[in-house]
Image (cartoon, rainbow, N blue to C red):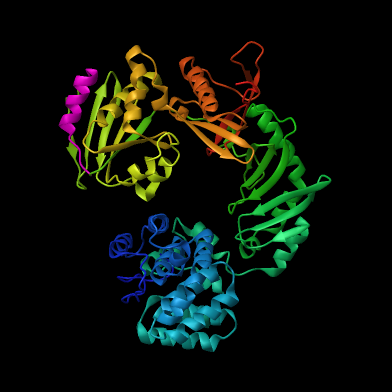
């Protein structure tokens, strides 16, 4: 944690409450549990608040605008963002805070001004940061950390005496404080603002950082690189790029450059201040070698990834903070990404075009109305329904959960009770994908516990593991208060899941339980996708922009899924498939539209 000391509430005082409260007492207690003395669970804290806002807006408790204007929420939100310590999150805080400024001014909340000034500073907006830091200490001179920020910014703008005065004001409030005494010394030494920020709050942690022994030093240096801009080097970088358009700090630097008789979109995932720290020779080398990298990217896609490159055009490039370069090629709805490292060599690992699902694990969650289950009933039902013995006892955990682990014909199976809902509203969000069950979201929202059901094939085939997984889930659905089955990117109605398991009686795969055939519509037509093939080690499939009826597209996806799994087929880029004589439907492999990662795009037949 590098921005401030956390108190029992975000500003160490009783918050000023309004008629409308976004955060309940229970919410505040949950957020306080995520705080720590030296570090905290800041990503979880932010996820919690984002989900609270989504839930509150959906349930009509408040609007998005009311949530953003809420002072208490803004204080917690900026606290989490600032302590993550990454540019993207400082920017997120800077975008969130202005809506609550009137409430902060009315409450004379120096903590609000401090946190907003901190976010602005790390975004490189130093004049604004100083304005809000000064306003904060004027409104609330008893808040010490406002003086800390004010002192740093006064020193940066050449007011050394005013900076030392701010330090004195802070030390009068927190005598002997490590941050203030360190700041006083660095002001007297004429240190830069970024040097003043190269610290941790905790003296022991800071000593390790200053000695060069902190494993997070690189991340720390990257975050402070976005504070001060080297205008001379930035101008030279722009001259090397020769941009025809330039958009800065929104939140990144995006531009157009001339390329092969046209223009090409480029982006640095940095603000101008951080971009100004990139070595000019590296940028010049990037510009000089871009046509060569373009050719090497196409060769890689064709020769190593086995993808067709005809009519594939370089659409954009992007530079990550670690200077990994992304080249994006595209045609129509297809996209391919190729990665190059800082030295302009092909990244040997993590190439999206080479990534394929490994499979080997089946996973589902049975949503429960209450955070409890009966493992003895589960064992009896498993024996009576499927003749599968389970001779082990469930092991209790400290949080009130329990786990039942056992082997079946060389496969490892586990059923675990988690006595709490699926975090962050994930189950409810995915329940909305089930177009066959209008009450899916409402039912999922009622769950207070979950049974994790998983099978690892080990010595057996994926097919055998899949059949066992469905049997276990069906057995778990007999538990009292079973509301739904969260699997394959959606939530199934328990009755549907049980009925879809019937093919197992004839030795066939229960495809509808194992793979979800999703449908959604966009401007160009009805689209479909599979979700579940990855567990079998197969790539997911997508069918885009059809004029098909929903039932026809669902049947088409089901036929494709059956063919892939029953015949153990692996499709490749550039192949065709046909279900009737003379039918040749093209197959392409590219970045997913619905899914992250690569998917197989199958053309829909003109005649269903």
Q: Is residue 122 above or below residue 305?
A: below
Q: Is residue 109 above or below residue 588?
A: below
Location of residue 390 in the rendering, given as x and y in whole percent from the top left corner:
19, 24
Magenta residue span: 371-388
Taken as a whole, is the magenta stretch helix, strand or loop? helix
Residue shown at 66% from the left, 17% from the top: 584
Q: Nearer the viewer, residue 496 or 248?
A: 496
Q: Is residue 599 above or below residue 126?
A: above
Query: On the picture, is 508 further left or further right than 472?
Result: right
Residue shown at 70% from the left, 65% from the top: 233
Q: Nearer the viewer, residue 40 or 57?
A: 57
Q: Quadrant of the C terminus?
A: top right
Residue shown at 17% from the left, 35% from the top: 374
Q: Nearer the viewer, residue 320 or 538?
A: 538
Residue with the most extreme top position: 581
Q: Quadrant of the N terminus?
A: bottom left
């Amino acid at each position: 944690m590098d921005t401030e000391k956390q108190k029992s509430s975000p500003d160490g005082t009783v918050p000023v409450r309004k008629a409308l409260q976004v955060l309940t007492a229970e919410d505040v207690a949950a957020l306080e549990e995520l705080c720590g003395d030296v570090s905290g669970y800041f990503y979880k804290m932010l996820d919690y608040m984002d989900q609270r806002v989504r839930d509150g807006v959906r349930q009509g408790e408040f609007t998005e605008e009311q949530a953003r204007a809420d002072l208490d929420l803004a204080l917690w939100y900026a606290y989490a963002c600032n302590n993550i310590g990454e540019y993207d999150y400082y920017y997120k805080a800077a975008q969130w805070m202005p809506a609550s400024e009137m409430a902060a001014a009315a409450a004379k909340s120096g903590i609000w001004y401090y946190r907003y000034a901190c976010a602005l500073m790390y975004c490189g907006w130093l004049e604004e940061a100083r304005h809000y830091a000064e306003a904060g200490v004027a409104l609330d001179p008893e808040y010490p950390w406002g003086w800390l920020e004010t002192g740093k910014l006064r020193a940066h703008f050449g007011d050394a005496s005013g900076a030392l005065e701010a330090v004195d004001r802070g030390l009068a409030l927190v005598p002997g404080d490590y941050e203030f005494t360190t700041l006083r010394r660095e002001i007297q030494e004429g240190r830069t603002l970024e040097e003043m920020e190269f610290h941790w709050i905790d003296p022991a942690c800071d000593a390790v950082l200053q000695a060069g022994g902190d494993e997070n030093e690189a991340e720390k240096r990257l975050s402070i690189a976005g504070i001060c801009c080297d205008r001379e080097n930035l101008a030279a970088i722009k001259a090397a790029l020769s941009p025809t358009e330039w958009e800065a700090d929104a939140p990144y630097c995006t531009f157009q450059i001339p390329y092969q008789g046209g223009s090409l979109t480029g982006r640095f995932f940095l603000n101008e201040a951080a971009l100004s720290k990139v070595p000019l020779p590296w940028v010049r080398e990037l510009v000089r070698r871009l046509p060569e990298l373009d050719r090497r990217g196409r060769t890689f896609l064709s020769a190593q990834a086995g993808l067709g490159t005809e009519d594939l055009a370089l659409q954009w490039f992007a530079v990550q903070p670690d200077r990994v370069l992304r080249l994006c090629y595209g045609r129509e709805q297809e996209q391919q990404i190729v990665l190059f490292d800082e030295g302009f060599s092909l990244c040997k690992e993590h190439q999206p075009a080479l990534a394929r699902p490994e499979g080997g694990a089946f996973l589902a969650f049975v949503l429960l109305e209450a955070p409890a289950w009966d493992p003895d009933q589960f064992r009896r039902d498993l024996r009576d329904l499927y003749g599968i013995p389970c001779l082990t006892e469930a092991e209790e955990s400290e949080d009130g959960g329990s786990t039942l682990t056992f082997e079946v014909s060389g496969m490892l199976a586990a059923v675990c009770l988690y006595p709490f809902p699926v975090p962050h509203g994930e189950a409810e969000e995915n329940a909305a994908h089930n177009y066959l069950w209008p009450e899916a979201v409402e039912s999922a929202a009622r769950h207070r516990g979950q049974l994790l059901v998983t099978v690892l094939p080990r010595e057996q085939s994926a097919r055998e593991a899949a059949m066992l997984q469905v049997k276990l889930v069906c057995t778990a659905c007999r538990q009292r208060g079973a509301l739904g089955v969260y699997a394959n990117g959606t939530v199934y109605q328990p009755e549907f899941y049980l009925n879809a398991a019937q093919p197992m009686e004839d030795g066939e795969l229960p495809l509808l339980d194992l793979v979800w055939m999703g449908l959604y519509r966009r401007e160009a037509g009805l689209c479909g996708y599979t979700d579940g093939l990855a567990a079998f080690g197969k790539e997911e499939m997508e069918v885009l922009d059809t004029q098909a009826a929903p039932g026809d597209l669902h049947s088409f996806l089901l036929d494709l899924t059956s063919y892939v799994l029953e015949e153990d087929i692996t499709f490749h880029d550039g192949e065709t498939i046909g279900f009737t004589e003379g039918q040749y439907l093209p197959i392409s492999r590219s970045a997913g539209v619905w899914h992250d990662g690569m998917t197989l795009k199958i053309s829909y037949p003109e005649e269903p």
